[in-house]
Image (spheres, grey):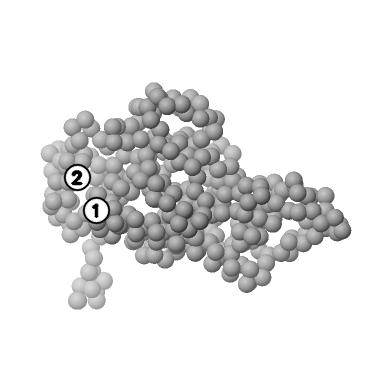
Amino acid sequence: MSKYDKGKAFEVSYMLWEDFRDTILFPKVHGEQWNHLVEQDCIIGWINYCAEHRSPDNAYQSYMELLASQVQIWPLIPHLKMAGDKWNTQHHLHFVALKLQTFSPETAMLHIGEHITTQSVLKWSNSECGEHVIFPGDDSQRQWTYFQCHMSPDEHWISQEYVKSLHNLGEWRVFIIGGVISFVIHTHWLQGWDWEGSRVESYLTLEEIWQLQYMVQRPSQQSWCSHGIDIPRNEVSEEAKLPWVDLQNKIINPEYGTEVIQTLGREEFNTFVLSTWWELSLRETRRSGGKSYICTFCRIDVGIQMMKGRRPSYFVNEVE
């Protein structure tokens, strides 16, 4: 308790990822660093399992298991392997969406030689942070010769339905710590494949977003008002809809609407995120036999699926 009272209960040290990786791959060369790792009470962090750190003799995995026998590693290795496989996560998310009656993009595993549609998003099952994600239009990489250079027998390429609104409206990146939403960042594409992000403080309900995007003409009025937004009559018809850029500007941190309306929008968003997180954490915990890492910390990327004639729906694009 004396160390705790003096603020010294935890002595935290850090190691660059490159140094850690080299120590694991070549422990005999980096004996001093290996001994430093073994002396720790616990190693906390994302221990990467992507292809760049594999070798034909599985040295990386073998030495990681050896290190885990000498020092506590968190998250546990089985959880890390499960977290690194997008196919398993997408499979869970599909059945979670069925239970919650929400939208889930159509996702399928590709088999070698199978025809690849031009309008799907392709993802490598063990990629991370947006690497090895191929969007429609990038035909140079939509080839099996490329795919087979980035996979091993236990990995796959996944074909996922392209959701136009995800590209046009961006996504809400939700950071969850201990089952509580800590903060939310909205990100969207800029020209040149750059990202722009802003912290989200307020929300609209899906019903309001629907009214903004697909508006029914009122023939007896010169204009009509939807929650404080005046829309000229010539912009209101069964076919007309706001341009994506205008819709994005109106739904990200909206400054209009009563406090009650914005509270309902926040509750609707939070309910979707936490319900999905809870169901996913249950499935991963049951599968691994121990509490899933996402019970402690994770990031859930949320988009809005929008189709004419259907009420918008939140959906999960990625879980990191």
> Where is mark 2, residue-wise?
64
The numbered mark at residue 109 is none
Q: Quadrant of residue 252?
A: bottom right
Q: Identify residue type, mark 2.
A: Met
Identify the residue shown where x is 51% and y is 54%: 102
Q: Is residue 113 above or below residue 125?
A: above
Mark 1 highlights which residue?
76
Q: Position of residue 170 (x, y in %)?
A: 56, 48
306 left or right, relative to 107:
right
Q: Quadrant of the N terminus?
A: bottom left
Tag nearer the camera, 1 or 2: 1
- Disc 1 marks which amino acid? Leu
Estimate how packed mark 1 is, as few (under 14), some (14 to 19) or many (20 or more) residues with alpha carbons within 10 Å: some
Disc 2 secondary structure class = helix
The quadrant in which residue 20 appears is top left
Left or right of 297: which side holds 69? left
Sequence-first tag of 1 and 2: 2
Residue at the (39%, 59%) spot, across then down: 279
